[in-house]
Structures are given as structure tokens and as C-alpha cells.
Amino acid sequence: MKGKLPLEIVENIFTRLPVKSLLRFRCVCKSCNSFIKSSNFIAAHLSQSIVATKNRALLLLSYGPQRNNKIHTTTKETVIKVQDLDSSFSHCRLIGCCHGLICLTGRQRFGGFVFIIWNPLIRKSVTFTEPDNYFGSCFISNGFGFDSGTNDYKAVSIVQFAHRAPVSPVVRIYSLNAGSWKDISERAPTCKMIEINWTQPFVKGAIHWLASLREGNNSSSYYHMILSLDMNDEAFHEMILPRSLAHGYSPQEIHVSAFQDSIALLHFFNKKYLSIWVMKEYGVAESWTKNLVVDLEINMPHNVSRLLSFRSNGELLLEIDDGEVILYEPETESKQISFLRFLGDQNYRFLDSYNESLLLLDINSNVASPSVTNEEEHTGS
């Protein structure tokens, strides 16, 4: 790139630009294209994006019958973009999001599961399949995260067979760098994964799931805990829950969420009460603190049907009975409620903290872009 400004100043300016502008600048000249596609610039732009958009961007996947899947992105200013994902699989499920990459999975038309790691802003993705087809009495938990040691993005598949419980699940990790799966089942503890549809938080370099462990070798009772998988060394760790949640309630009522640089537990009881526990010091069980209790019947003028997310700035996203999504700020004096008006289906799988990035832009092989149509921008009132 030739010009009067030093390269470091140009890079500093470019890292602050949105992805759409940078994609247009690629057409200016070959040197611009090479500069923007370089791995060093992509990393620098991502770092700036994380700082600039932390706690502001939201992303949701709506899903409907006949493979009618849509991606919604919005900020608190209610600027909404809708993209149709014309996928070749049904029962689309959002696994997680990391650095602007979205990981989804679904069942193929003729059996088996397919995965997509997708950057919707640049419309590039990597598609791969589960190495085995699983049928019968089993359920699958998934996760998606980043290995900072090798600069690699990894998808995780944990398969639990009901007729074999309680035994260690089958665990495989897909490496985007290697383009292949690796079996690490021998490292997995003997536990029961909790079969829920939440996305799994990626915090402190690890993916977190809810699971249950047997009280003793001969006991028929279980206690609930958090199972984490470190993306760097691919080792499992167990995290103790507060005593009341570990034994006192159904694990289906509990959700583990990211909260700032640690994790939180959301207990959504009988659609009437919501309690939030925060681990003040990550990895230290004694630091669990009940941070908030919300009586939804008193504080909420709407019937809440589902808790979607607890964001790192303390905001709650809730779905009410008519399918609307609301943003609730319980920490403010006015306890402000904002309606987020999304077009299309009134059924959502939710994902939080989406950052714009150029990741996958420099990848040319093994890439299949999902067919994206009817892209629109709407400004809510």
C-alpha cells in the first residue's frame, strides 16, 4: 500500500473500521486486498473489535420448520440485520460463538450430524461432519472455543449413551487448523451430561457444561457440578456448585453463563423467580455469591416464558409469552425494560457477545459458504 501515511498509522485506522468497510476496501487495489487478508491484520482488527464491542453486540439464531433458519444481530440501539441461512440440514442448533465465528450443528437429511464454523459478515465457513452416526438412546453435548497456545479454533462433541450410564462419554475435538477430529474419551470423567439446549460458555480458555456425578460408588444419588474442558491442554476439570444448587433443584432449571472474566449460574425457578450466583474468583468454589434475586411476578409486567441470557453488564434477556424478546436491566433504579423487535419466526436460540471479525478471510481451502439471502437492515423504533 503506497501513500503518505506510515503503515502503522494506516493499520491503526483500519483496525477501527467495521468489517463491511474493509471488505469494500479490498477492491481498491491488490496491495489493499493483501494487507486486509493478512493474518497479522486480521488478528489486530479482532483485538480492537473485542475492546470496542464488548457487552454491546447480540446475536440470535431463530429456527423454524422446514429448515427456515435466520441469523439476527443487533445492538442495544436496535439496529437489526437478518440473514437467511439456507442450510442442508434440519434441527439447526447454535453451539457457540467465539471471535466472530459462529459454530452450528444439525442433522443431515440422510442421518449423521454436520457442523459449520461460519463467519456471517464475510460469508465464509468451514463445514465438517461428525465421524460417526449416532442413533438410539444417546444425546450429544457440544462446545466451541479457542486454543490460544496454537491459535486454533476447536469444536467439541460429547456423546452420552443412556444404556451405558454411568460411564465416561465419548469425547472428540475438531481442530480447525488440522481439519480433523481427535478422540480424547479416555480423559473424560464418569458423569452424566445435562441434556439442555443452552449454548455453552467459553471463559478463561475453557468450555463449561452442567453435569452430574454419582455421590459414591454404590450410591444411586447424584450431585450437580460444572464440567470444564481447557482448550489448550484438552484436560477436563470439575467445579463445585453452591450447595443449594448442587443438591436442591433439578439441573434443568440451572444455566451456566459467562459473566465478565468468570462464570455465573442462573436459576430460573417455576418461571416466577430468578436467582443469579456469580463466581467472584474463577475456579474458587468458596467465592460463589448470590448476586441477585428477581421476583418476576412483582418486577415484570409480562409473563416470562424463558430466560435467554445473562450478559456480562448485568442485563437479562427474557422471552415473554407472546414470543417477544425483552432486555431487562434489574440493577438500574427504574429497572428498565426494552423490547427487541426481531422479524421472522418467534422462536429463538440465543447467543451473547458477538464481535465482528475477519477470521476465515485468509482461508481458501475447505471452505463452503452457506447460501445467504434476503439480507436486510432495519432500524427499530
Image: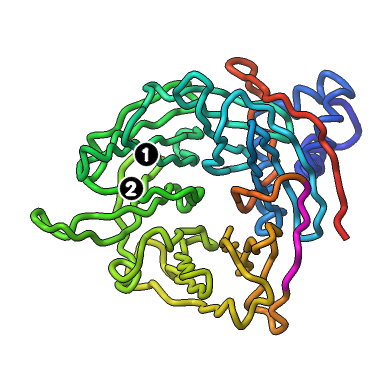
- Residue 224 rendering spot, x and y as whole percentages: 30, 60
Within-10-Å neighbours for mark 1: few <14, some 14–19, many 20+: some
Give the amino acid type for the residue marked by disc 2 in the picture: Met
* Quadrant the N terminus occupies: top right
Quarter of image, res 63: top right
Q: Identify residue for label 1.
A: 139
Q: Which residues are magenta?
A: 337-343
- Residue 218 rendering spot, x and y as whole percentages: 8, 55
**Residue found at the far top of this picture:** 365
Q: Identify residue for label 2.
A: 193
Are discs 1 and 2 less than 8 Å apart at CB?
yes
Is residue 142 visible in the rendered image? The answer is: yes
Up the image or down, 17 lies above or below 155; here it is: below
Tell me the residue at 72%/82% (across/down): 334
Tell which circle, 1 or 2, labels the residue nearer the N-terminal end.
1
Give the amino acid type for the residue marked by disc 1 in the picture: Phe
* Quadrant the C terminus occupies: bottom right
For this rendering, which residue is in front, 287 or 328?
A: 328
User: Could you say whether the residue bearing mark 1 is in a helix, strand or loop?
Assistant: strand
Locate residue 197 relative to residue 24 in the image: left or right: left
- Residue 92 rendering spot, x and y as whole percentages: 57, 35
